[in-house]
Amino acid sequence: MRLDLQECNLSRSTQASDIIQEILGSQLVIPNATRWNSTYHALERLKSFTSGGEGDLDEVCGRLDLPRFKEAEKTYISEYVMVLAPLALDLLQSDETAYYGVLLPTIATLIEKLQKIKRESKLQYCTPLVNALIGGVKQRFGYVFESRKCLMATACHPMFRMEYIVTEQKADTETGLREEVRRLQTPSTSPTADEEEDPPKAMEHSVYLLLLFSGLFTLCSCLSHRGGTEFRNWDYKGQPDNDGGNEHCAAMIPSGMWNDQPCDSKKSFICYDDNLILVRENKSWNEALSFCRQQHGDLVSVPTEQVQHWVNRRAQSASTAHVWLGLRFSCAMQFWFWVSVEDMCYENWAPGNETGECGHTGAVESGAGQQWVSLQETEQLNFICCKCGGI
């Protein structure tokens, strides 16, 4: 069916415009050849008059000596608007919202909506239009469902994360994100001219925000369990009971549960390596980060008070007054973050150091209160590496 859109151009005539305004209370939308969705908006406005105020529209046609709309034309307009509504996406035309991470979810949702319209709406005239749209969208945008970069961008968007990524692609997407984070976090061994002027440039990439929002994974955690000593596994038979008033130590019984015991009891024991390595070489923060990642795993993160105690023990043997941690201040986003993407739940700042400045990174005092301080990243300090694999 071919619909004559002459009625939509009536607003070009001043007399016709006045009549339309008088009867309908608003103007019709004029299709614009430079905007691909303007025909949709023109018919959407027309549909609002054909569906709820046929008498008023008939009066307009009578006053302007134009044929009245037939029922088939009204049905076509209604179906056309319903089919094109999911496609009239102002979202992807906006400079503020048209991020790459929005593309895949938008296309997936569009195809799903078109398929639902085709399946449930019992179209009389627009089934060929729905088929053409579904086929055209798949042909034009099918690549986004296979593009690793597009999948990574979607996973990093805080609104979508992994929701629109099929199970078979999740592992590869996560691997790609890990590789990209490594690339952006590791200082270049041969920096460009721009990087020489601004060494933290790579560290300021949005990847940190993306990962903090998405919460997908951590790269190398010094803590195999989160939450410090919050985990409990006491034997359910009233333990710990401090029987006799001298059971101040704990042991694991054959069931794997815990039991309090006198500290002078003779038992087998398990040695525990905290996987922290103090490097008594003086390096800048970026040099320390590169060294740890090449030789061990990462600069140490301190997500809990328990890890802070282990760091303090190592730092006491340092040859410098401060020891580098894997802590950096983001100039762009104005917050501190761990390079291992650990949560910043625990803090141990010395007074006045938590505000942060551009080009500053975090260190721990090797003596005194062993609190965190904010220092210029170019200072030459000892540092603590963390071996991947947990402690």
Image (spheres, grey):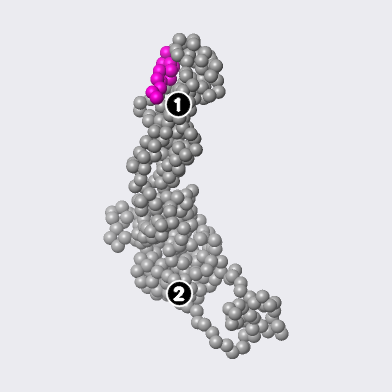
Along the line of sight, which residue is nearer the eye, 280 or 301? Answer: 301
Residue 262 percent across, percent down from the top left: 64, 85
Q: Pointer 2: residues within 10 angstroms few (<14), some, or many (20+)? A: some
Judged from the image, the secondary structure of the residue bearing numbered disc 2 is loop
Q: Residue furthest bottom?
A: 266
Q: Is residue 153 magenta?
A: no
Decide if residue 230 is in sight here: yes
Say the numbered circle drawn on residue 1: none
Q: Amino acid at mark 1?
A: Tyr
Q: Residue 272, position in %: x, y?
A: 50, 79
- Left or right: where 276 falls relative to 226: left
The residue identified by callout 1 is 76
Q: Could one spot residue 9 in this view of the protein?
A: no
Residue 26, above or below 177: above
Q: Secondary structure at mark 1?
A: helix
Which residue is depicted at the point 42% across and 33% down? 127
Tell me the magenta residue range. Answer: 1-13
Check disc 2 and report the residue beneath it. 275
Could you tell me residue 365's position as x and y percent? Answer: 49, 69
101 to the left or right of 348: left
Q: Nearer the viewer, mark 2 or mark 1?
A: 1
Dot 2 or dot 1: first in sequence order is 1
